[in-house]
């Protein structure tokens, strides 16, 4: 009722959007543009917040989903004229850092893993196993480039060359995004965009973050001790934990665990 009492000053409000997990389209990822869109819309539009804070703990994932989410954050921030602050927890690497860079300022814990501004493609080759089992892979295409990086056939040097060309293009897009968002804050270091990661203070020295800070005390210092918080996060319905999605959830969990393990987490 306090909001409706005349001449009563409303305390500052910060909307918090939690972004935790791997970034991927569909049900494979915890984070994707479709799942986050309604949360971000509410965070920026409901009650005109004084700021939006992003709680980020992500090892990365899809560059397209990272770009879509980051672009949505910037559109809403500019449309509503609301400042955005990112707070890194365990890790903001690769696509996770893409999301953090969408904020106006980035803060992290002293032990947070930050960076990995690069692009990776990983897979398995099973052609030797198939051969030993007496199995033959048969693929017929119209168009010489239709089949690329088939895991059941020997690796083709031309396919590898094409794949590396695609990864380089995505890497350039990632670099441009970081340079656009961080600008003169970035240190002119030769290994800044090599996929290297930095911890806490090192990340600050490289210009990847603005300082070491935690969300609640930082916001109280900035907006006053009376600041209120509204939290938004992805919630999965209980029924999705049963039936045919159970095996898929297990596989997605293993994939996400592998992504975190790349950074020693």
Image: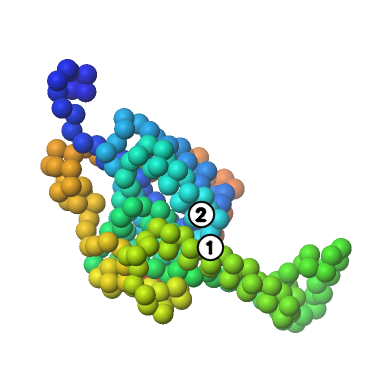
The spot of residue 178 in percent (x, y) is 43, 62
The spot of residue 16 in percent (x, y) is 31, 44
By what rule are the colours in the image chosen? rainbow
Question: Is residue 216 rendered to the left or right of residue 130?
Answer: left
Q: Is residue 17 above or below residue 57?
A: above
Q: Picture quarter containing residue 169?
A: bottom right
Alpha carbon distance from label 2 to label 1: 9 Å
Label 1: element kind: helix
Label 2: element kind: helix
Question: Is residue 104 rendered to the left or right of residue 64?
Answer: left
Instruction: Please name the residue shown 18% across and 43% down the image.
Output: 223
Instruction: Please name the residue shown 24% across and 51% down the image.
Output: 215
The quarter of the image holding the N terminus is: top left
Question: Is residue 58 rendered to the left or right of residue 210?
Answer: right
The label shown at residue 67 is 2
Look at mark 1 in the image and give the residue it sits on: 173
Chain-order first, disc 2 or disc 1:
2
The total number of labels drawn is 2
The spot of residue 217 in percent (x, y) is 17, 51
Name the residue nearer the viewer: 21 or 50: 50
The spot of residue 225 in percent (x, y) is 12, 42
Tags 2 and 1 in contact by the CB under 8 Å rule? yes
Name the residue nearer the viewer: 143 or 83: 83
Instruction: Please name the residue shown 35% across and 45% down the image.
Output: 17
């Amino acid at each position: 009722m306090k909001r409706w009492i005349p001449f009563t000053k409303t305390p500052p409000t910060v909307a918090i959007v939690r972004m935790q997990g791997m970034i991927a389209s569909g049900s494979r990822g915890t984070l994707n543009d479709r799942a986050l869109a309604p949360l971000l819309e509410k965070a920026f539009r409901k009650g005109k917040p004084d700021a939006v804070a992003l709680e980020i703990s992500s090892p990365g994932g899809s560059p397209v989903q990272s770009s879509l989410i980051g672009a949505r954050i910037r559109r809403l921030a500019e449309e509503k004229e609301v400042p955005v602050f990112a707070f890194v927890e365990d890790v903001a690497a690769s696509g996770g850092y893409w999301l953090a860079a969408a904020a106006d300022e980035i803060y992290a814990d002293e032990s947070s893993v930050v960076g990995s501004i690069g692009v990776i493609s990983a897979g398995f080759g099973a052609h030797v196993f198939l051969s030993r089992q007496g199995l033959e892979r048969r693929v017929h295409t119209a168009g010489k480039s239709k089949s690329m990086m088939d895991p059941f056939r020997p690796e083709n040097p031309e396919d590898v060359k094409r794949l590396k060309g695609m990864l380089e293009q995505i890497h350039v897009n990632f670099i441009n995004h970081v340079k656009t968002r961080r600008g003169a804050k970035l240190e002119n270091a030769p290994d800044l965009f090599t996929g290297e990661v930095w911890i806490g203070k090192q990340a600050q020295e490289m210009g990847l973050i603005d300082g070491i800070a935690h969300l609640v005390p930082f916001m109280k210092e900035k907006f006053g001790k009376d600041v209120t918080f509204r939290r938004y996060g992805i919630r999965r319905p209980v029924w999705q934990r049963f039936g045919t999605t159970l095996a898929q959830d297990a596989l997605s969990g293993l994939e996400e665990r592998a992504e975190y393990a790349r950074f020693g987490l």
